[in-house]
Image (cartoon, helix red, strand yellow):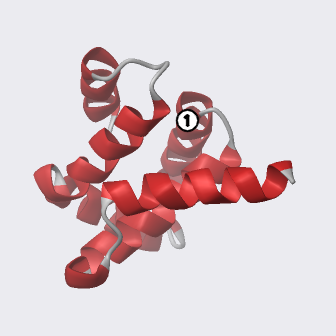
Amino acid sequence: MDELGDELARSVPAENPEEQWHALIDTFTTHRALWVAQLEAVVQAERSPEVRKHLAEGQRQGREGLGRSVPLALLTGLMLQWLVDLEHAPSANEVVAELHSLTESYRR
């Protein structure tokens, strides 16, 4: 995951959140095996304190990298949708449009 984060940081400007979401969502197909391994590790963490500790650290880094907990939760939910139901998972454009819509609804 560290390598993927570094790759994304090098290729996508931090000041462009729309491009960041597009790049992240693209990784669900380009790095599918990595995301599947993440899910498998979550199941293992239930029985392994060492795996749990490692994943917890990754969660903290993810929150820092994405800015907060809600974007990390969004990323996790999107990952599940892309891994389980690829045909009906939202596209990057749909995600960005819905994020804009949510932002506008909270500004009112």
Say which residue appears at 15% left-offset and 58% top-offset: 29
In this image, 67 relative to 74: left or right?
A: right
Q: Which quadrant holds residue 79? A: bottom left
Q: Which of 96 and 56 lies nearest the eye of the viewer?
A: 96
Residue 52 seen in this snapshot? no
In this image, 100 relative to 9: left or right?
A: right
Q: Which quadrant holds residue 102? A: bottom right
User: Could you classify mark 1 by the number of other residues whose Cα lies within 10 Å: few (under 14), some (14-19), or many (20 or more)?
Assistant: some
Residue extending furthest toward the left: 30
Q: Which quadrant holds residue 19? A: top left
**In the image, residue 73 above or below residue 39:** above
In this image, 45 relative to 4: left or right?
A: right
Say which residue appears at 27% left-offset and 34% top-offset: 4
Q: Could you tell me residue 34's position as x and y percent? A: 22, 53
Say which residue appears at 20% left-offset and 82% top-offset: 87
Q: Name the residue carrying label 1.
A: 66
In this image, 93 relative to 57: left or right?
A: left
Q: Which of 89 and 32 lies nearest the eye of the viewer?
A: 89
Residue type for callout 1: Leu
Quadrant placement of the N terminus: top left
**In the image, residue 25 above or below residue 37:** above
Q: Could you tell me residue 89's position as x and y percent? A: 32, 75
Residue extending furthest toward the front: 108
Q: Which of 75 and 19 lies nearest the eye of the viewer?
A: 19
Q: Secondary structure at mark 1?
A: helix
Residue 56 seen in this snapshot? yes
Say how many tags the image has. Answer: 1
